Image (cartoon, rainbow, N blue to C red):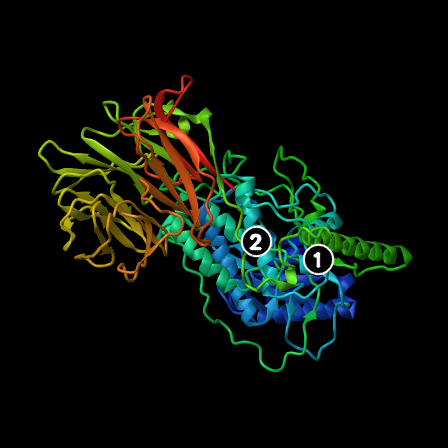
Amino acid sequence: MAETERQVGRYRIVREIGRGGMAAVYLARQIDLDRDVALKELSSFHAADPAFAERFVRESRVAGSMSHPNIVTVYEYLNQSGTPYIAMEYVERGSLRPFVGRTTLAQTIGVLEGALAGLAQAERREIVHRDIKPENLMVTADGEVKIADFGIAKALTDAGGPNLTMTGTTVGTPAYMAPEQATAGEVGPWTDLYSLGITAYEMTVSRVPFHDSTTPVAVLMRQVSEEIPSAATVDPRVDRRFSDWIDRLLVKDAEQRTRTARDAWYELEEIAVAMLGPLWRREARLLVSGTDRAAGPLTPAPFERQTPPPEGPGGGYETYLGESPGAAPPPPPPPQQQPAGPAATIPGQPIPPAPAPVAADPARTVAPASAPPAPGAPAAPPADAANETFAWPSQGGGGRNRLLLIAAIVVILAIAVGAFLFARSGGGSKKNSSPPASTTKKGTTPPAALPTIEADASRFQAGPLQSVAPLGRQAWALDHKKPRTLVQLAAGLNGAPIQAGKGAVNLAGGDNALWVSAKLPNGGGEVRKFVPGSSAAAAPPIPYPGSPVAPRVVVANGTIWQPTEKGVVKLPEAGGTPVQVKGLAFAPDSIELEAGFVWATDGKGKLARIDTTTPDPTATVVPLPGAAWITGDAKSVYVIGASGVVKVDPKNPQTQTPVAGISAPPVRIGLVGDILWTISYGAPAGGAREATLTGYDVDHPGRATTPFTFKAPATGGYITKLVDIDNTFWLTTLGGSDGKTTGLEPYVIKG
C-alpha cells in the first residue's frame, strides 16, 4: 500500500512532514470530521521499549489536559498494531524559527504575549514545559503563536506513577536552558520564563547569548556561570525598557527572576503601550503578505483560566522524555528578495513578509521531510549542537565510556557553579561591600548601573532643524529653511525631503505617521498628515479654529489634540467637527499624552488633565506653581515646577511629590525607562550657551548620572525637546568642523 493510502484508525496519512530520532510526524486527514491533523508516530524501535511508549502516552496526557488558544491541541492517543500515535492540531505555517531576527517590535511583543498566555495555562496545570524555544512556538494561519511539544515537560500530577527519568537528569536545549535546569536543580514556571527570555533576546538581537560556543557542555557551563549582556548593550537601538524586561527573565538566581507568566505579561503590556501606544496590536500579527492584514489587530491572548487545575494531591514532579516538536509543519513559503538582517520597517507601511525558512532547523528536534530541494538551493548546513534538545545522561547505550562522560560533565558543571559563586561573593576578599546573597531581601532588585551620554559628532546635521519627531525608530525634523520640509535625520539630509507646505509651525509623530501643525493666512490652522514611503494618496488637511502655538500636536488612537491660543481642540483623525475642550482657557505651554490622559500647562501655575475617552472632553485644572514642561509614561507624569520637578498622581493631580535631587527647574525634561532626563542652559557667553544634560533615577531617589555638557547656540531656537528616539536625543548644538555651526547632533544613551 502506498504511503499516501496508509490509514491509522480514522486518519488517512497524506504525507510525512517531519522526522526525528524517536518519532515521525505526518500530515493526515481525519475522515469522520474532514479536517487536517498532525499525526505523530513513535518509531518502531522505540515503540518496543515500554519506557519510551509510556513517555509517549504521558506526553499526550499532559498536552491533552490543557485547552488554550495558545497551546497546540492534542485530540487523542491511539495504538495500532503495537505502534503508538498522537493526533494533534495541524499548524500549517510551521515554527517561529524562520521569523527570528526579522520581526517588528510589535510582532515580537505579540509572540511573547501568546507564549506567556500559554505558559500561564501550563502554570495553572502545574506543568513546566522545559523546552521553550522558537522551534516549539508554532505560527498559525492568522499570525498568532501556539506552544507545541510537551515531550519533556514536568508535571505535578500522577504522583503515584513510575519515575520515568532518573533523579538529577538534565533535559532541554542548552542554548535556552535555565541555570537550575542545567544543573538538574528544582524547576518551576520561572524556568520556562528564562527560556522565553532567551527567545525574546534572540528575536531582538538576532542571536542567542552564547552563540559562539560550539558544544552543548560549553553552553551549559556558560548558562550557569556567565552573566548575559543586556540586549540594549548588544544593540543600542533596543529600547531600554524592553531590554530591562528581558533582563528580569534572565536573572541567574531563580528566586530573583520574574516568577510567573502573568506577572511577566503585566509588566510587558505596560511597556508595549508606552513604546508603541495602545493600538500596537494592529501591527502585531506574523503575516506573510499584505492580504493577510484583513485578519485585523492581533487578538489579546487570554490569561484567564481555561481548564481547571489538577485534582488530587501532588506528591512530586514526574519527568518524561519525548520527541520535539510535537508537529513540525512546513515553514511559510519564501518571499522574494528578503533582506538578510532584521526588518527596518516604517510604521504605517505593510508588515514585511515572513522570511524564507532557514536551511536547517537549528533545534534538530524533528528533521525536515525528505522533499527534493529547489533548483539551485544550497545544501543544508549542519545544525548547531547547542540548540538541540538533549537528555543528560543519554537514554541509549551504556558502558564505561558513557559513565566517564557523565562524571566529567557533572564535575565540570560543579566547578563552574563554584567559580561563579566564588566570584559573586567577591573572590574571598574582605573588601566586598555588598551583603552576601543569603541576606539579600527576596524580591528586591539592586539599582542598575546609571546610563551615560555619548555624543555622535559623525552624524551632526547642520541647518535650522527643529521639532525632532519619531516615526518608529526613525528621527525626523522640520527644516525651517523656506520652503519648509520634513527631513529624515538618519538619511543625512541627502534623502528626499517632504514638502511641509506653507505656514508649517512644528512637527510631531503619532499613530504611525508624521503630523505638521500649520498657521493659515486667515488666522486659522490645520493639521497635515504625512506617511513617508507610502504610495497612498495624501490625506486632506484637517482644519481647526484658532492658530497653533509652540507646543506640538498630540496624536493617538485616531484623535488629534491641537493646542491653540485659546486652549485645546479635539479633532477626529478621519475628519469631522472640531471639539473645543471645556474648562481650559489658556494657551498651552506644554501638552503631552501620558498615563492615559492628555496633560497641558500654562507655563505659570496651572496643570490641566483631559479625559481622552469622552466625546465632549472637559479639563480638570489644578494649581502647580511654575507648571511648565511635561513628560511621563504609561503610569507616571512629571512636570517642571517653580522649585524643580514634581511627580503628579494621574488619578489625583493635586497629589504632587517633588523629585529628589532636582532643586532648580530645568528647561526641558524627558522620561526614558526609569531615568528622568533634564536639560538646562547657561547664560550666553562668547556666542554660545553651555547646555547640561543630567539623568535622575526615579526608582532610587538621590541617584543621578554625571552631568553631560555641550555647546548650544546663544540665540535662536536653541531649546530642544527631549524626545527619546531609539535611545537617542537629537539636540540643537554648535558643531561641524569649526564647532560653531548650528544644527542637530545625536546624543546616545549608553547602558
Given residues 556 and 664, the one toward you in this image is: 664
Residue 721 visible at all: yes
Looking at this view, name the residue that lies furthest to the top: 738
In the rendered structure, the answer to whether residue 220 lies left or right of residue 536 reads right
Mark sitting earlier along the chain (1/2): 1
Q: Which amino acid type is shown beneath numbered disc 1?
A: Ala
Return the residue at label 2. 197
**Callout 1 touching callout 2 (CB < 8 Å):** no
Between marks 1 and 2, how big is the CA–CA gap? 16 Å
For label 2, the SS is helix
For label 1, the SS is helix
Asked if residue 596 is positioned above or below residue 527 in the image, the reply reads below
How far from the left and from the top, in percent, is residue 489? 38, 29
Q: Residue 585 has which mark?
A: none
Looking at this view, name the residue that lies furthest to the left: 522
* Residue positioned 35% across, 33% down in the render: 476
Asked if residue 518 is positioned above or below residue 354 in the image, the reply reads above
Looking at this view, name the residue that lies furthest to the right: 400
Give the number of callouts: 2
In the rendered structure, the answer to whether residue 700 lies left or right of residue 734 reads right
Residue 331 visible at all: no
Q: Toward which corner of the image does residue 269 lie, by quadrant?
A: bottom left
* Residue positioned 27% across, 49% down in the render: 558
Return the residue at label 1. 182
Q: Residues within 10 Å of mark 2 (few under 14, many from 20)?
A: many
How far from the left and from the top, in percent, is residue 744? 37, 28
Q: Which amino acid type is shown beneath numbered disc 2?
A: Gly
Q: Residues within 10 Å of mark 1 (few under 14, many from 20)?
A: many
Asked if residue 730 is positioned above or below residue 418 in the image, the reply reads above
Give the quarter of the figure containing the N terminus. bottom right
